[in-house]
Image (cartoon, grey):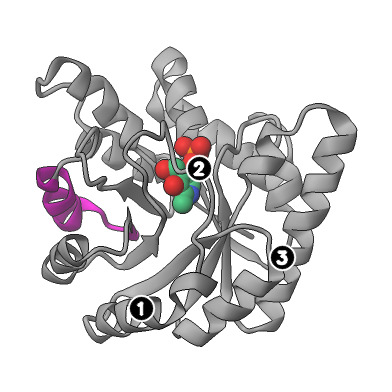
Amino acid sequence: MAKLCVNVDHVATVREARKTVEPDPIAAAVLAEQAGALGITIHLREDRRHIQERDLRIMKEIVKTKLNLEMAATRDMMDIAIDVKPNQVTLVPEKRQELTTEGGLNIISQENYLKEVVRELKKANITVSLFIDSDLDQIKSAKKTGADCVEINTGKYSEAKGERESDAEFQKVDAAVRFASRLKFTVHAGHGLTYRNVKRVADLEEISELNIGHNIIARAILVGMERAVKEMLSIINQGYFL
Ligand code: PXP
């Protein structure tokens, strides 16, 4: 059964809209764990548009399950990660202008550099995951970096228009997940997943972790954080709402 890691970035997005202290992503993380989330994910972006270093440092103290830090593979971010030591780092590509992470890492073009990044993070006892598109060559290259896990990007599956496109994108995710599992990666998946499209992905037995943010926070604004997380868990596990 896939673990649900709740990404609370967008609680911080609302806070940063006014540069004030509320709502606090720390409170959201506590409520998500109370509702059954088995991990909390945050993305500390270079431009600090939502999560701040303060959030990361407090999360490290209060998260009782697993803290997954998404970050770019830059020297500055590595120094922060090695200092704070989240349980897991997920390396993602980052562009300033993007609204959210737009695709997986190009590992092939920076394999040697990423090998060094992975080595340093693992030396600090941090599990390393690479966010990657459903591309078998990229997954092969990921293996050579020494990373522990890959997170298969479900963005295209989530954005697919109509059943046909959705089926085609799902097949790519499925093939990538199975290939990564054969290479002995711990396999995660995420990006763009919703209450409507998550079940198919959650049912892939090789997937051990799902990272879901925007859709849970969007729902939480209307129904509350604990209910939103419980409803997502209910769909992942049973296929229907509580
Ligand atoms: N996985 C990765 C690597 C991401 O960058 C994000 C977005 O921060 C997510 C999962 C969660 O995506 P969403 O907010 O669309 O659920």
Gap between marks 1 and 3 measured at Cα: 23 Å
101 vs 111, nearest the viewer: 111
57 is within the stretch colored magenta: yes
**Residue at left offset 51%, top offset 63%:** 106
Q: Secondary structure at mark 3?
A: helix
Which residue is under mark 1? 113
Q: Does the Cβ of the disc 3 residue fall within 8 Å of ligand 1? A: no
Look at the image and tell me whether residue 198 can be seen: no
Which residue is under mark 2? 102
Q: Secondary structure at mark 1?
A: helix
Q: Secondary structure at mark 2?
A: loop
Which residue is under mark 3? 176
Q: Does the Cβ of the disc 2 residue fall within 8 Å of ligand 1? A: no
Q: Position of residue 53 (x, y in %)?
A: 12, 47
Which quadrant of the structure image shows residue 184? bottom right
Q: Position of residue 13 (x, y in %)?
A: 28, 26
Q: Is residue 152 above or below residue 52?
A: below
Q: Does the Cβ of the disc 1 residue fall within 8 Å of ligand 1? A: no
Which callout, 1 or 3, points to the residue nearer the camera? 1
- Provide the residue span drawn in magenta: 53-68
**Residue at left offset 43%, top offset 54%:** 38
Q: Amino acid at mark 3?
A: Ala
**Residue at left offset 90%, top offset 36%:** 164
95 is within the stretch colored magenta: no
Q: Is residue 166 above or below residue 152?
A: above
- Quadrant location, the C terminus: top right
